[in-house]
C-alpha cells in the first residue's frame, strides 16, 4: 500500500463505483453460518440507518466508530457505527442516519456532505434492514458523546481499511455455536458482524480507487522515462 494518505476525492471516486454488496459481505459471515430463525409469524423488517462519517484528523481522513454501553437494548459492548432505528418523524433513511449520529456523538452535521450509500445489510436476529450512508464533515468535530449510548469513541484513520493485516479471524463460542468469526482489528478492538461487513464493502471500493492512483502514478513515471529517453537521443 502507498504511504500517501487517502484523499476525499478518492473516496468520492470509490463511491461512484458499482457496489459489490453481498459478494463482499459473505467474506465477513460466520462459518459455518449460524441459522437465524425468522420472526414467527413473519413480520415486516424494521428499518435502521448508520453513518460512516469521515472528517479531517491530524492531516488525514478518519472515521468514527463507537463502543456501545451496557445500557442499550441490543449489541451491548459491541463496536458499531453511530446510527439507529427509523422514527416516525424521519423523512428518509439518510435523515435517520444523520439524526442518530448527531444524538450519539453530540455534534452538528448541518454542514456535512452526503457522499453516497453502501449496500443495505439485513440482521436476522433483530429483524432489521440496516442502510449505511457515507458523509464528510470538512472540519474536526468536537464530540460530546451520549453517556447512555456510547462507552468509547474510536477514531480510525481510513488507511487502516487498506491494511490486509487488520482482517483476521478466530474461533468463538457464539450463543452456543462454535464458529469462525472474521473481524477487523481496529484501535485494539474486534469489529465484526454487520459493522465489519459494511466496512469490508467500503474497503473494497476504496482499494479500487486507490489502485487507480497507483496506476496513474505508474503511467506518469513511464511518461517521464520516455521523455528522458527522447532527450538522450
Image: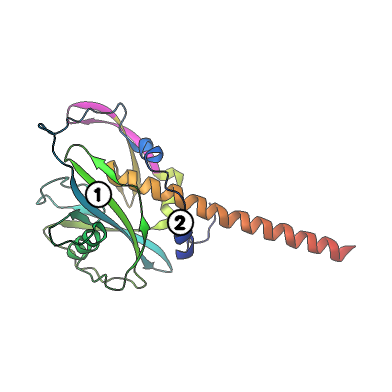
Residue 77 position in % (x across, y down): 18, 47
Residue 205 position in % (x across, y down): 45, 50
Q: Describe residue 7's horizontal placement relative to residue 212 as left or right.
A: left
Magenta segment boundaries in residue numbering: 167-179
Residue farthest to the right, as pictured: 233
Residue 178 within the magenta-colored segment of the rendering = yes
Whether residue 17 appears in this view of the structure is: yes
Residue for point 19% across, 60% down: 100
| Disc 2/disc 1 C-alpha distance (Å) | 27 Å
Task: Return the mark for residue 16.
Answer: 2
Residue 111 within the magenta-colored segment of the rendering = no
Name the quadrant containing residue 107.
bottom left
Q: Describe residue 70's horizontal placement relative to residue 192 as left or right.
A: left
Q: Secondary structure beneath disc 2? A: loop
Residue 108 position in % (x across, y down): 24, 71
Residue assigned mark 1:
79
Residue 5 position in % (x across, y down): 49, 62
Name the quadrant containing residue 177.
top left
Residue for point 28% across, 28% down: 33
Q: Magenta region's main secondary structure?
A: strand
- In the depicted structure, whether residue 41 falls above or below residue 150: above
Camera-side residue: 34 or 113? Answer: 113
Q: Describe residue 68's horizontal placement relative to residue 158 as left or right.
A: left
Crowd band around label 2 with a 10 angstrom C-alpha radius: few (<14), some (14–19), many (20+): some
Of callouts 2 and 1, the N-terminal one = 2
- In the depicted structure, whether residue 91 falls above or below residue 122: below
Amino acid at each position: 500500500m502507498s504511504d500517501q494518505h487517502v484523499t476525499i476525492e478518492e473516496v468520492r471516486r470509490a463511491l461512484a463505483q458499482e457496489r459489490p454488496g453481498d459478494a463482499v459481505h459473505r467474506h465477513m459471515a460466520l462459518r459455518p453460518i449460524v441459522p437465524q430463525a425468522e420472526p414467527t409469524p413473519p413480520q415486516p423488517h424494521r428499518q435502521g440507518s448508520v453513518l460512516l462519517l469521515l472528517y479531517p484528523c491530524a492531516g488525514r481522513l478518519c472515521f468514527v466508530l463507537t463502543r456501545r454501553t451496557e445500557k442499550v437494548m441490543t449489541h451491548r459492548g459491541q463496536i458499531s457505527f453511530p446510527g439507529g432505528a427509523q422514527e416516525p418523524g424521519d423523512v428518509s433513511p439518510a435523515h435517520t442516519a444523520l439524526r442518530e449520529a448527531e444524538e450519539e456523538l453530540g455534534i452538528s452535521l448541518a454542514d456535512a456532505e452526503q457522499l453516497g450509500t453502501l449496500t443495505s445489510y439485513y440482521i436476522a436476529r433483530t429483524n432489521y434492514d440496516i442502510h449505511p450512508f457515507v458523509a464528510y464533515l470538512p472540519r474536526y468535530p468536537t464530540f460530546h458523546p451520549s453517556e447512555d449510548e456510547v462507552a468509547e469513541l474510536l477514531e480510525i484513520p481510513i488507511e487502516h481499511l487498506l491494511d490486509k493485516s487488520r482482517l483476521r479471524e478466530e474461533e468463538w463460542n457464539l450463543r452456543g455455536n462454535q464458529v469462525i468469526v472474521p473481524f477487523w482489528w481496529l484501535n485494539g478492538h474486534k469489529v465484526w458482524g454487520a459493522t465489519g461487513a459494511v466496512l469490508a464493502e467500503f474497503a473494497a471500493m476504496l482499494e479500487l480507487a486507490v489502485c487507480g492512483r497507483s496506476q496513474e502514478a505508474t503511467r506518469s513515471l513511464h511518461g517521464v522515462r520516455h521523455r528522458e529517453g527522447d532527450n538522450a537521443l
